[in-house]
Amino acid sequence: MSPATEAALAPFNRKYLGSKRLLRKRIADRIVEAAGVPRTFLDGFCGTGAVSLEMLARGAGRVTAVDTLRSNCVVLRGACGTPADPAGRARLLGLLEALNGLEPRDGYITESYAGTYFTAANCRRMDAAREAIEQLRADGAVGTAEHEWLIG
């Protein structure tokens, strides 16, 4: 798999305002300095899960990530649900490619966010993808882990 293809499966390819993505290593350094690598780690208000994923990478045995926003938890579970096996990874990339090729359409995202946070063109692409992802789930074509990865 090429580095560009592999990057699509990486948990930090999604950037959000206020994310601790750029601070995660410094935060983890301080935690490890003060307490060592924990067997268990609680990431309250985890957001995108940047610190949770960093602590796992440093050897934390178990991470419990909590947030009041369900969407943050879904994104983190999706990032952690990326399959390790080549066939599973290829399947996700194939689904992603199909979603990126959909005909854009108007929907909730376009009505709510076009011209504010996103361009109308990008909102229309997101609406098409979100509807297709929900249809894949309704049809049983994707399971919970794939669904969460796709909407993350």
Image (cartoon, helix red, strand yellow):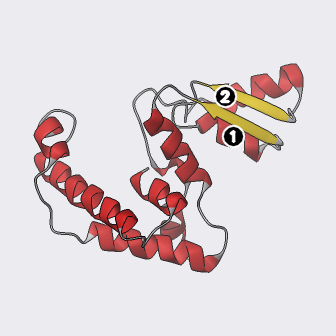
Q: Residues within 10 Å of mark 2 (few under 14, many from 20)?
A: some
Above or below, 17 against 97 in this view is: above
Residue 40: x and y in percent read 82, 33
Residue plotted at (66% across, 37% down) = 52
Which amino acid type is shown beneath numbered disc 2? Asp
Report the front residue among 45 and 23: 45
Residue 24: x and y in percent read 63, 32
The residue that mark 1 highlights is 54
Q: Which residue is most to the bottom?
A: 87
Which amino acid type is shown beneath numbered disc 1? Glu
Report the front residue among 151 and 144: 144
Residue plotted at (24% across, 53% down) = 126
Above or below, 30 against 38 in this view is: above
Report the front residue among 10 and 29: 10
Residue 91: x and y in percent read 49, 76
Work out whether residue 122 can be spotted. Answer: yes
Residue 124: x and y in percent read 15, 54
Work out whether residue 9 can be spotted. Answer: no
Quick one: label 2 or label 1, which is nearer the N terminus? 2
Residue plotted at (25% across, 59% down) = 131
Question: Answer yes or no: do the residues labelled 2 and 1 have beta carbons within 8 Å?
Answer: no
The residue that mark 2 highlights is 43
Residue plotted at (74% across, 46% down) = 57
SS at mark 2 in the image: strand
So how many labels did they put on this image?
Answer: 2
* Discs 2/1, front: 2
